[in-house]
Amino acid sequence: MNIPVQISGENEVALSVPHKFPDRAEVELLLRIGLFSPDDELALRDVWRILEGQTDDYLDRMLGMVAAHPALAAAFTALCGEESATHSLDGAAAVRDCFRRWLFETCFFPHEPPWLKQMYLERVLPDSPVQPSPTLLPEFRHTVALAYPLVATARPFLAAQGRDHQDIERMQHALLKAILLQVTLLSKLYVKKGLW
């Protein structure tokens, strides 16, 4: 049964209201729904141990996948806080540092990634001395679309370590769960208050 959604006006829906980072209970519920387990946390530590020295190669492979889609490249640079998403990503040191930090925080802080909490803080405190750039939030559909390339491009690096198929699957699934949780938490910044 479809229940019609009543919208009082287009302007009301487009109104951006600052959101607080979801509280611990909300995050825990999302983790349970997403079947995130203590084994996933261990698997993410393994992902970091394997990819720590290969973040540039991992990023290069991921960028190769999204290069054919300028909108995805723009979304990635926007998430890294780059002023202009039109420049080449290949040599951008800021993008590489951002990617390395994102991977580390994803593997060690999957419940509350510091980069994401900072993004909420900048949105909630508009008088903050650190003003977010207008491109900080990419179009949401591109953020969702980045989830798969981030996971798929990690697989060859995980497999190169001589791990068995089940172990590779375990690490890849843990990475996917962590990324989907981040996308879910990020989505709160896009939706009208009360609909998240």
Image: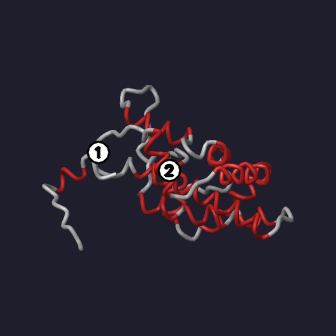
Q: Residue 3 location, x and y as percent?
A: 20, 67
Q: Residue 114 location, x and y as percent?
A: 56, 38
Choose top left, top right, bottom left or bottom right for residue 176: bottom right
CA neighbours of label 2 inside 10 A, class few (<14), some (14 to 19), many (20+) = many
User: Is 139 placed left or right of 175 in the picture?
Assistant: left
Q: What residue type is labelled 2?
A: Ala
Residue at x 67% of width, y 56% of height: 90
Residue toward you, 16 or 76: 16
Q: How far apart are marks 2 and 1 (CA)?
A: 18 Å
Residue at x 35% of width, y 40% of height: 19
- Tell me which numbered mark, 2 or 1, is placed earlier along the sequence: 1
Q: In which quarter of the image is the N terminus?
A: bottom left
Q: Name the residue under label 1.
A: 16
Disc 2 + disc 1, Cβ < 8 Å: no
Choose top left, top right, bottom left or bottom right for residue 113: top right
Q: Residue 164 location, x and y as percent?
A: 82, 68
Q: What residue type is labelled 1?
A: Ser
Secondary structure type for disc 2:
helix
**Rendered view: 28 above or below 59:** above
Secondary structure type for disc 1:
loop
Q: Residue 186 location, x and y as percent?
A: 45, 49
Residue at x 50% of width, y 36% of height: 118
User: Is 98 placed left or right of 184 in the picture?
Assistant: right
Q: Mark 2 points at which residue?
A: 78
CA neighbours of label 1 inside 10 A, class few (<14), some (14 to 19), many (20+) = some
